Image (cartoon, coloured by chain):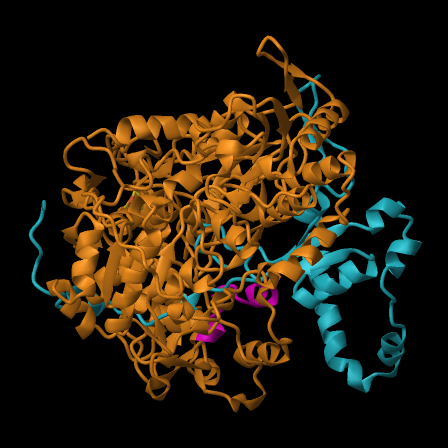
Chain colours: A cyan, B orange
């Protein structure tokens, strides 16, 4: 449900972008520039979490899956390592409210969106290069190409 | 409907793979089959205002010859592709992901699973897109009822004999068959016979097999032959008796065997050490860098809570493509064993006692002030990151000593000319070479990913390989020219037949092993190699074929940062030795009364000599910059918390400097990096290869003569090269089972 809402919102936003030049109401939105760190300030997030260093990256394709549905999204890694195994039950505890946010809750369509999100929260960020595959010409006929005389085996 | 669909596509805002996906559902509306609608859909619309479609996964397309571009239509969208590409690749360029099992972009095309069927206009039957070359003007349709039906049929046949054991399968959740059966599978089976079953094979300690799950895509067979270069796997039998196996009971003896786990589209080949340990959706992935060799493979560290559960590769075309070596993939259990938890001081009885950081640092600071500056020596270990090496060097320099080096770089490293210690051709550039001369290096054990590139090149273009060094195994054709520097001299003087091979080559590559750094006649050997390079025209403005293949992750950065000892034998007179994760430095000559500080994460050789232990974080627990052998700086990211009371390396040195009264001027990792910017700015230029500026021609003539001692193997045991891999049980098993001859 939340997901589909998100999608609707996404579409709406894109249509908004498209129609922006013609509409007066959205023009006003453009005027309101958000200053770095402002969202963070008004959101009541504790100060120490507004000065975090984060890494913006685009997750690589899972090595075991060929599908590309999830590729191309951008995520924020909060580099949170304050974790420990709870001695009572063996569950994992964390002292960092952002521990699961980056992995599970934040996803962006573009690098710019992720950057501006980080900026608005006042996080210091670095962006990791997104590695993309290189498509080279391949052909089935290569299987039957002459590749020199067979080499003697078992040398 | 056809028009509506098109209209919505026109409206679709630029490049958004998510939205693409949303609209990329398979439509089985009868309207689509009606002639007018399909005509409307196929008409190559006045496309000027169509947004450009992004290739699947943001892929770049390599045009070998820009004039040879052809245009095809995928679902009505025109795309330009190089001539000779397959229909499947054309669809990929058009941003349409075609379901597939046997096709893999890095393996040869088999065309045996038939999952990739698409409809092509004027073709009577659906075509297997992975094997069909795209022809100019071809009209490919990927979301028609015909294509859907064809794929559903294939899927039904595949599932006929596939066990329904997803709940107990380790591939569950990241399985191609699962994914694609969500789209094309039926909700009930029509097959009422018994499913076939296949005996599991034993492929060794790394790869677990459940052969009943195999769908005979032969990806693993092609991987073994083409990438790993071993003829271990094959397909036996025919029809429903078909089995993947090694024919005779045999273990898979490749150093890349772990990759078959990834390429297997089902759960037939899974990771043995990871079996039933965790489900993949519980894991948190952290994109990081491997440090077990100097290649710097890109990896994802999957952790659950405070534990590293597995390591998987991630794509980097320039370095490791999509593969990693078995050492990289399976050493992770070493991260949990033999860890140093607390600062410790060796008491008078020779036993270590855990103390607080304050006490430990106070003791070290006190001792370091009692020795003469020349008697202080610092050695950085194989796994040190650039930040900590910078801090160590700055600290010892402030103490007045300039004897800092990184192990593996030899007693008199040459840090002046960067082209003398990095791989100038670059790893991906090796693919363009047509002759290789390997001098004292065995890439198969020293850098398995570099070896995979050489193997790929040899397979693709029949490149010739000459090797000088002790007899060893190669997984490609290779001419063993000799064992010692004498052969090298012969080639340099043009007396050896291989010299004419180099001379006739278009782009020859010479790869010198870093094991030579430890030899006393290293300068002479380098001059000889340079002589060959000069005469053979190996270094030209358009091609630099002079390469050094490093052994450890820390080496290149250490040389960039100038970790060069003042004198080669400073250890013999040292009174204070600071080992920063250094375990393989030879401490035999160290005076008995020397005070040794060991800062590191594993209790290995270094600890036996230590008086004080300062526990540090392993590379999975910290942020660190590493430069790989081709001069590309990359950073690790923390995936799991540190163990016990351990701290980041540079922080320990920084704290110690304060206690010792010579405070280093940086408090944050950002500040350390600005310090690095002054020394070696290329280390901050992440993910970009920084080529060396000057060639070797600037070097003064050497006067040394080569000795006749044959080259030694730089690495005895591929599976155990550093403290982490030495502590790993899986690596121990591998060396016991796979290395026995
Ligand atoms: S074991 Fe896996 S990779 Fe090999 S043929 Fe079977 S399904 Fe394909
Ligand atoms: S992917 Fe085309 S036949 Fe298997």
For the residue pair B543 and B211, the one nearer the viewer reads as B543
Where residue B325 sits in the image (x, y, percent)?
A: 38, 44
Q: Quadrant of the C terminus of chain B?
A: top left
Is residue B250 rendered to the left or right of residue B326?
left
Is residue B287 rendered to the left or right of residue A153?
right
Residue B417 shows in the view: yes
- B20 within the magenta span: yes
For the residue pair B186 and A113, the one nearer the viewer reads as A113
Where residue B674 sits in the image (x, y, percent)?
A: 70, 58
Looking at the picture, does residue B354 appear above or below residue B397? above
Residue at (37% x, 85% y) in the render? B66
What span is in magenta?
B18-32
For the residue pair B154 and B19, the one nearer the viewer reads as B19
For the residue pair A96 and B334, the one nearer the viewer reads as B334
Looking at the picture, does residue B277 appear above or below residue B303? above
Where residue B507 sits in the image (x, y, percent)?
A: 27, 72
Is residue B578 rendered to the left or right of residue B550?
right
- B401 within the magenta span: no
What secondary structure prevails in the magenta region?
Answer: helix
Residue B391 picture quarter: top right
Residue at (88% x, 66% y) in the render? A35
Residue B128 shows in the view: no
Where residue B35 sits in the image (x, y, percent)?
A: 42, 82
């Amino acid at each position: 449900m939340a997901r589909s809402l998100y999608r609707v919102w996404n579409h709406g936003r894109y249509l908004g972008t498209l129609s922006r030049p013609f509409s007066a109401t959205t023009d006003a939105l453009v005027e309101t520039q958000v200053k770095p760190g402002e969202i963070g300030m008004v959101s009541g997030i504790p100060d120490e979490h507004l000065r975090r260093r984060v890494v913006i990256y685009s997750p690589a394709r899972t090595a075991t899956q060929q599908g590309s549905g999830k590729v191309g999204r951008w995520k924020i890694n909060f580099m949170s390592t304050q974790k420990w195994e709870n001695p009572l039950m063996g569950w994992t505890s964390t002292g960092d409210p952002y521990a699961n946010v980056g992995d599970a809750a934040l996803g962006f369509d573009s690098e710019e969106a992720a950057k501006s999100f980080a900026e608005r929260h006042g996080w210091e960020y670095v962006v990791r290069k997104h590695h993309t595959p290189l498509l080279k010409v391949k052909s089935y006929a290569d299987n039957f190409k002459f590749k020199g005389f067979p080499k003697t085996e078992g040398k | 409907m056809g028009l509506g669909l098109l209209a919505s596509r026109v409206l679709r805002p630029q490049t958004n793979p998510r939205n693409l996906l949303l609209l990329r559902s398979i439509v089985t509306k009868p309207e689509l089959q009606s002639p007018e609608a399909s005509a409307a859909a196929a008409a190559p619309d006045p496309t000027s205002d169509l947004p450009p479609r992004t290739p699947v996964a943001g892929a770049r397309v390599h045009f070998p010859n820009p004039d040879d571009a052809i245009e095809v239509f995928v679902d009505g969208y025109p795309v330009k592709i190089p001539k000779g590409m397959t229909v499947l690749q054309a669809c990929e360029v058009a941003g349409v992901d075609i379901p597939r099992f046997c096709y893999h972009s890095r393996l040869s095309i088999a065309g045996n699973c038939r999952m990739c069927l698409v409809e092509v206009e004027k073709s009577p039957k659906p075509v297997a897109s992975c094997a069909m070359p795209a022809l100019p003007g071809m009209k490919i349709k990927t979301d028609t009822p015909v294509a859907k039906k064809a794929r559903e049929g294939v899927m039904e046949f595949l599932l006929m004999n596939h066990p329904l054991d997803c709940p107990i399968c380790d591939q569950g959740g990241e399985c191609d068959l699962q994914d694609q059966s969500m789209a094309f599978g039926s909700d009930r089976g029509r097959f009422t016979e018994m499913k076939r079953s296949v005996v599991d094979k034993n492929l060794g300690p790394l790869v677990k097999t459940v052969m009943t799950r195999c769908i005979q895509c032969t990806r693993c067979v092609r991987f073994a032959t083409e990438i790993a270069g071993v003829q271990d796997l094959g397909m036996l039998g025919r029809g429903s008796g078909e089995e993947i196996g090694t024919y005779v009971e045999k273990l898979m003896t490749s150093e890349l065997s772990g990759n078959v786990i990834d390429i297997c589209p089902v759960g037939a080949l899974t990771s043995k050490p990871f079996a039933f340990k965790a489900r993949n959706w519980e894991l948190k992935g952290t994109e990081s860098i491997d440090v077990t060799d100097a290649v710097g493979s890109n990896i994802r560290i999957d952790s659950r809570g405070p534990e590293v559960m597995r390591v998987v590769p991630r794509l980097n075309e320039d370095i490791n493509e999509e593969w990693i070596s078995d050492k990289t993939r399976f050493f992770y259990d070493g991260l949990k064993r033999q860890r140093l938890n607390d600062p410790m001081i060796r008491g008078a009885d020779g036993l270590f006692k855990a103390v607080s950081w304050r006490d430990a640092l106070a003791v070290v600071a006190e001792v370091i002030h009692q020795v003469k500056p020349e008697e202080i020596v610092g050695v950085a270990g194989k796994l040190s990151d650039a930040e900590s090496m910078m801090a160590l060097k700055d600290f010892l320099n402030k103490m007045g000593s300039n004897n800092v080096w990184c192990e593996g770089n030899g007693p008199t490293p040459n840090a002046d000319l960067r082209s003398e210690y990095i791989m100038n051709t670059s790893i991906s550039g090796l693919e363009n070479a047509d002759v290789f001369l390997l001098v004292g290096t065995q890439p198969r054990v020293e850098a398995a990913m570099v070896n995979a590139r050489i193997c790929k090149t040899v397979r693709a273009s029949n490149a010739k390989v000459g090797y000088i060094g002790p007899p060893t195994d190669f997984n490609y054709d290779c001419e063993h020219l000799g064992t010692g520097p004498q052969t090298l001299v012969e080639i340099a003087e043009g007396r050896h037949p291989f010299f004419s091979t180099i001379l006739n080559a278009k782009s020859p590559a010479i790869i010198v092993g870093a094991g030579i750094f430890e030899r006393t006649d290293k300068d002479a050997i380098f001059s000889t190699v340079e002589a060959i390079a000069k005469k053979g025209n190996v270094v030209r403005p358009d091609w630099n074929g002079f390469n050094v293949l490093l052994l450890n992750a820390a080496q290149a950065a250490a040389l960039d940062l100038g970790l060069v000892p003042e004198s080669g034998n400073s250890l013999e007179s040292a009174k204070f030795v600071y080992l920063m994760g250094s375990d393989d430095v030879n401490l035999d000559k160290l005076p008995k009364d020397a005070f040794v500080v060991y800062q590191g994460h594993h209790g290995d050789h270094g600890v036996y000599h230590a008086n004080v232990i300062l526990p540090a974080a392993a590379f999975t627990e910290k942020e660190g910059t590493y430069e790989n052998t081709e001069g590309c700086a990359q950073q690790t990211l923390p995936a799991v918390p540190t163990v016990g009371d351990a701290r980041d390396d540079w922080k320990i040195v920084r704290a110690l400097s304060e206690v010792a009264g010579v405070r280093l001027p940086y408090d944050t990792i950002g500040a350390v990096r600005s310090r690095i910017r002054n020394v070696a700015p290329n280390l901050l230029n992440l993910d970009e290869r920084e080529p060396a500026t000057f060639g070797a021609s600037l070097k003064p003539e050497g006067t040394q003569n080569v000795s006749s001692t044959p080259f030694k193997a730089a690495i005895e045991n591929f599976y155990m090269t550093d403290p982490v891999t030495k502590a790993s049980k899986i690596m121990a098993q591998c060396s016991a089972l796979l290395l026995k001859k």
